[in-house]
Image: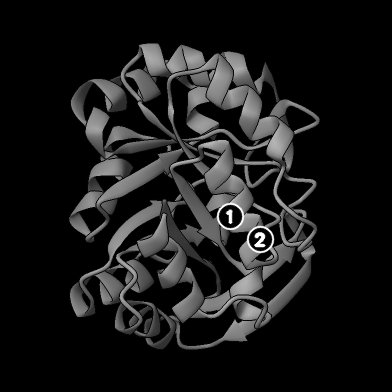
Amino acid sequence: MIIVPAMDIIDGKCVRLEKGDYERKKTYSSDPLSVAKAFEAAGLKRLHLVDLDGAKAGSPKNLTVLEKIASSTSLEIDFGGGVKSLEVLESVLSAGAAYANIGSVAVKNEGEAEKMAAKHPSSLILSADSKDGVIKVSGWLEDGGVDVISFINKWYQKGITKAVCTDILTDGMLSGPSLGLYERILKETDVYLISSGGVSSMKDLQDLFRLGVPSAIVGKAYYEGRITLEEMREVELAC
């Protein structure tokens, strides 16, 4: 199982939110590059970088953070937050991202998302973030009006074969991952699933592995000292 540390950015700083609520923010570092270098030094290979300002505004606002990390580390970065056009997607890839996450555009502007999927299918990860099984978009501030399984299957057929899936009710809560949701996704779709939200311990990662989840994002559990970088790497090597 591939372990992917998460880094959420607001105003160039590394933060975490609870349940996607911008009013429930905690700042962990004003130097995202140093955090990324620590991930790299521990032997981790991936980074989930989320521009929360960009998600809220509708266009990336922290590309300089992406550029710094991409140019100064060997981490394979997937970037999300405000990627809503082919032009923006290509600017994100040019800034050093290996992948870009798209969610809102796949709901609100399917034609543009289809252009992106047609030209860069292998560089896209679908952000299938849901609350009570319904997709949420625009920084989780709006209801997407579509069931998470239907959403994933629709875009899989259009060429997006990877999806990062967050149960918003678990995000930042250290309450355990949404195993029921991930079991449904594994059974009812063929997508490469990247789980996100709720991981609080090594046991949670082991539960995800036993369920068959191929990749898991770890965020707050690391920043709050619940899981160390060494433990994340151990799980990756063991699984």
Q: Quadrant of residue 94?
A: bottom left
Q: As drawn, is 95 to the left or to the right of 33?
A: left
**Vertical side of 104 occupied by 190: above or below:** above
Mark 1 residue element: helix
**Vertical side of 181 occupied by 154: above or below:** above
Q: Quadrant of the C terminus?
A: bottom left
State the image coordinates of residue 67 (x, y, percent, origin top left).
Answer: 27, 70
Pointer 1 local density, CA inside 10 Å: few below 14, some 14–19, many at least 20: some
Q: Quadrant of residue 86?
A: top left
Q: Residue at x 38, y 24 (%)?
A: 113
Mark 2–mark 1 distance (CA, rounded to whole Å):
5 Å
Q: As drawn, is 135 to the left or to the right of 212?
A: right
State the image coordinates of residue 74 (x, y, percent, origin top left).
Answer: 20, 71
Q: Residue at x 30, y 42 (%)?
A: 89
The reply to whether discs 2 and 1 touch (Cβ–Cβ < 8 Å) is: yes
State the image coordinates of residue 192 (x, y, percent, origin top left).
Answer: 41, 32
Q: Nearer the viewer, residue 170 or 67?
A: 170
Q: Nearer the viewer, residue 124 or 164?
A: 164
Mark 2 residue element: helix
State the image coordinates of residue 143 (x, y, percent, origin top left).
Answer: 74, 29
**Is residue 145 at least partly visible in the picture?**
yes
Which kind of residue does numbered mark 2 sit on? Lys
Query: Label 2: which residue?
Result: 203
Query: Label 1: which residue?
Result: 206
